[in-house]
Image (tube, rainbow, N blue to C red):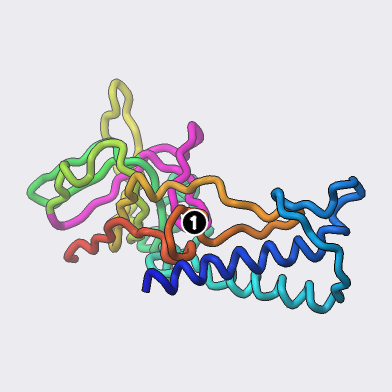
Amino acid sequence: MLRLRLKAKETYRSIARCIFEKAGTGLTNSPDRGIVRGITCQEAPMTGRIVVTLAAVLLVSLAGCTNVIRDEMGKGADPSVTIELLKECPSRYLGKLVMLGGMVAETRNTPDGGQLEIVQFQLADDGYPERSQVTGGRFLATAPTLLDPLVYLPGTLVTLTGEFKGTRTRPLDEISYTYPVVSIREIHLWQEDDEPQRPFGIPGTNLIDPYYYGHDVPMHFRPEGVIIRPNQ
């Protein structure tokens, strides 16, 4: 299996190199326009149809890079519902299935179940919470079962889907803070090595290498960490 993955990886990059070796004469007017990433390109006739065909192969490869977290966990969730909307008009979204993510600030357990206090971050296309100083604030994620503080450590990045239960006001330091409350349906714990890295880009296009996460499989097989479905 590993050999097949490596072969696919080599094939993908060979196709990309072939396209730009053959089309290299049209990339720039400089004298070294036939050199792409140190590879000398032999000027040879190539019809536009062949270039388009090879490019299509790349696009088909990338088309398989589905957003696993969003596709699997986000089923039924309305992507237009943001934490800001939940705060502004909570009654409108009661009972709605939402998808949120961010960084765990605190884990609590009571006789009624577990509770996470989460600092919200914007979700990337693949569901990854993008670390930023910009946040929509904090929200609470609840479960009827224990949420182990040694699993949900402060600083852990999570993405979750759940039913919006309204808001709850309680002290935060020396202020009174109103939290949107979500009952967890599924929650995904991101691992440190899941954080996106800068992709290998193909010059002159918006195409990227689907293996750029450093693994021997394409992006849609990116490590998923832990997905937990609390008992309802």
- Residue at image position (66%, 69%) is 15
Answer with left or right where residue 87 lies relative to residue 20.
Answer: left
Question: Mark 1 = which residue?
Answer: 81
Residue 230 x %, y %: 20, 61
Residue nearest the viewer, comparing 121 with 41: 41
Magenta residues (range): 119-145
37 part of magenta stretch: no
- Relative to 172, does residue 184 appear above or below in the rendering? below
Q: Name the element at disc 1.
A: loop
Residue type for callout 1:
Val
- Residue at image position (45%, 53%) is 214
Q: Quarter-wise, where is residue 168 in the image?
A: top left
Residue nearest the viewer, comparing 24 with 213: 24
Residue nearest the viewer, comparing 199 with 195: 199
Residue 36 x %, y %: 74, 52
139 part of magenta stretch: yes
Image quarter where the N terminus lies is bottom left
